Image (cartoon, rainbow, N blue to C red):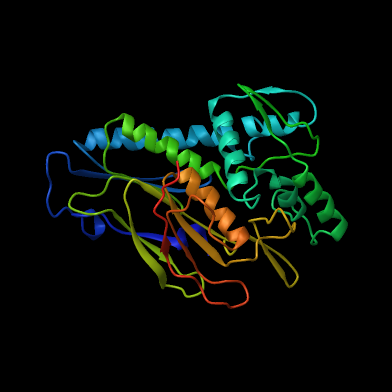
């Protein structure tokens, strides 16, 4: 299952299947763009005063996603993240606004989740072969070394200066970067006066307002164990939703199949849940908290709603439940 399989947008208010309008008001011109950013499919839908204004807003949102990707990706040696990793244990780096924001938020979510979310898991990703191809699963000694590197990681922020004092610290923004990019893209839409929009980066989504005449953007969360079935349908309005699962990006070592979301405490891929979906106030929070929930097997603070698709070992899934306090 890829990330696209975990979510479907079922409708956009007054618009039927295929984008055919049923009615149109002065500010209800529906515009959508499909594209590619952050290594994934991107779908932007919005309502604007004109088609031209809508297309310009979509282009600005997509450009912002790509700008954030260029800063925070682990797969471009020129990115700020790669530069920071190279500075580990050596020098202090001057960080721009994006890097400072993500590091600050990452530290916050690590504290909120008791370490279930941790951007310092790159040594484990590398040990399991997700960043460097390998022919066999890591030995116990290699995992101990990687776990020790994660546990010893410290990120020191002082204004625009950032330091990784431990030379073995390596960061990976895979559990927070997409959410941060979506939030930045929504900011570009709001700056252009867009009040109804939906941004989907291959299953991580966020909504501004709602389609005309609707309570929210209607979204279906797919069941990873039953093709074509769903575990929940929900509406998003001024909120974000993200799903984490270890059935999407996997590596096989003989009979051993491992997923890409790491448990910092055990050094193994997360095995508490099959799939975790959360709704939060921001896409950054939804991204990080869904990762933490998959790792810990329980709902962390800051979640508005959550669903799980079952526990590893065949236990029954939890139903959706709500919290009344929205995260900051």
Counting from the top left corner in percent of width and height, residue 4 is at 46, 58
In the image, farthest residue toward the front: 324
**Looking at the image, which residue is at 42% across and 66% down?**
320
Left or right: 289 with respect to 117?
left
Left or right: 204 with respect to 85?
left
When asked about the image quadrant of residue 283, the answer is top left
Asked whether 73 or 283 is in front, the reply is 283
**Looking at the image, which residue is at 80% across and 26% down?**
90
- 326 over 55 or under it: above or below: below
- 57 over 248 or under it: above or below: above
Counting from the top left corner in percent of width and height, residue 280 is at 43, 50
Picture quarter with the C terminus:
top left
Q: Is residue 249 visible?
A: no
Number of numbered markers: 0
**Looking at the image, which residue is at 38% across and 38% down?**
186
When asked about the image quadrant of residue 254, the answer is bottom right
Counting from the top left corner in percent of width and height, residue 111 is at 62, 44
Left or right: 163 with respect to 2?
right
Counting from the top left corner in percent of width and height, residue 18 is at 25, 57
Asked whether 57 or 87 is in front, the reply is 87
In the image, farthest residue toward the right: 141
Q: Is residue 321 visible?
A: yes
């Amino acid at each position: 299952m890829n990330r696209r399989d975990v979510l479907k947008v079922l409708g956009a208010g007054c618009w039927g299947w295929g984008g055919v309008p049923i009615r149109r008001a002065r500010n209800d011109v529906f515009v959508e763009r499909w594209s590619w950013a952050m290594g994934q499919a991107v779908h932007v839908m919005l309502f604007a005063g004109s088609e031209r204004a809508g297309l310009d807003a979509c282009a600005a949102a997509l450009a912002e996603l790509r700008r954030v990707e260029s800063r925070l990706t682990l797969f471009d040696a020129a990115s700020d993240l790669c530069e920071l990793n190279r500075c580990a244990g050596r020098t202090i780096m001057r960080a721009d606004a994006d890097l400072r924001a993500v590091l600050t938020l990452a530290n916050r979510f690590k504290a909120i989740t008791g370490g279930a979310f941790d951007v310092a898991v790159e040594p484990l990703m590398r040990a399991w072969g997700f960043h460097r191809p390998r022919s066999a699963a890591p030995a116990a000694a290699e995992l101990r070394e990687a776990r020790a590197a994660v546990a010893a990681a410290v990120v020191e922020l002082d204004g625009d200066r950032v330091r990784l004092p431990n030379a073995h610290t390596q960061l990976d923004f895979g559990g927070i970067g997409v959410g941060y990019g979506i939030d930045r893209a929504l900011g570009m839409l709001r700056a252009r006066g867009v009040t109804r929009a939906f941004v989907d980066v291959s299953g991580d989504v966020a909504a501004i307002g709602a389609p005309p005449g609707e309570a929210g953007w209607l979204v279906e969360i797919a069941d990873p164990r039953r093709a074509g079935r769903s575990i929940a349908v929900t509406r998003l309005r001024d909120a974000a939703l993200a799903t984490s699962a270890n059935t999407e990006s996997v590596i096989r070592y003989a009979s051993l199949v491992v997923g890409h979301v790491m448990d910092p405490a055990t050094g193994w891929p997360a095995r508490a849940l099959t799939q975790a979906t959360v709704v939060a106030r921001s896409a950054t929070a939804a991204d990080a908290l869904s990762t933490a929930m998959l790792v810990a097997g329980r709902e962390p603070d800051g979640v508005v709603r959550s669903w799980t698709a079952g526990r590893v070992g065949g236990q029954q899934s939890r139903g959706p439940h709500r919290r009344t306090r929205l995260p900051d």
